[in-house]
């Protein structure tokens, strides 16, 4: 998500979504998805 936010990955939709997230939101998403199987 940070790569999208920093525009290091080219995907306009994801860049828009990630650009609206705070660092804490990205960390929370990573923690959530890290627990999924």
Image (cartoon, grey):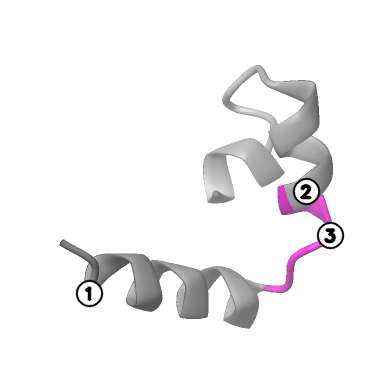
Q: Nearer the viewer, residue 18 or 33?
A: 33
In this figure, which residue is indicated by the disc labeled 2?
A: 17
In this figure, which residue is indicated by the disc labeled 3?
A: 20
Image spot of residue 16 (x, y percent) = 84, 41
Q: Are marks 3 and 2 in contact (CB under 8 Å)?
A: yes
Image spot of residue 18 (x, y percent) = 71, 51
Of label 3 and label 1, which has the lower sequence position? 3
Which label belongs to residue 14?
none
Among the 4 quarters of the image, the one containing residue 23: bottom right
Going 70% across and 36% down the picture, which residue do you hit?
14
Going 49% across and 70% down the picture, which residue do you hit?
29
Among the 4 quarters of the image, the one containing residue 32: bottom left
Callout 1 secondary element:
loop
Residue 21 among those drawn in magenta: yes
Residue at the far front in the pictured view: 37
Within 10 Å of the Cα at label 3, are there few (<14), some (14-19), or many (20+) other Cα atoms?
few
Q: From the viewer's perspective, tell me whether residue 37 is left or right of residue 33.
A: left
| 14 vs 21: above or below | above
3 or 1: mark nearer the eye: 1
Callout 2 secondary element:
helix
1 or 2: mark nearer the eye: 1
Of label 1 and label 2, which has the lower sequence position? 2
Span shown in magenta: 18-22
C-alpha distance separating marks 3 and 2: 6 Å
Image spot of residue 21 (x, y percent) = 74, 65
Q: What is the quadrant of the C terminus in the image?
A: bottom left
Within 10 Å of the Cα at label 2, are there few (<14), some (14-19), or many (20+) other Cα atoms?
few
Among the 4 quarters of the image, the one containing residue 31: bottom left
In this figure, which residue is indicated by the disc labeled 1?
A: 35
C-alpha distance separating marks 1 and 2: 22 Å
Within 10 Å of the Cα at label 1, are there few (<14), some (14-19), or many (20+) other Cα atoms?
few
């Amino acid at each position: 998500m940070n790569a999208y936010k920093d525009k290091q990955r080219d995907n306009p939709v994801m860049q828009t979504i990630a650009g609206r997230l705070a660092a804490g939101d990205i960390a929370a998403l990573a923690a959530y998805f890290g627990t999924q199987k």
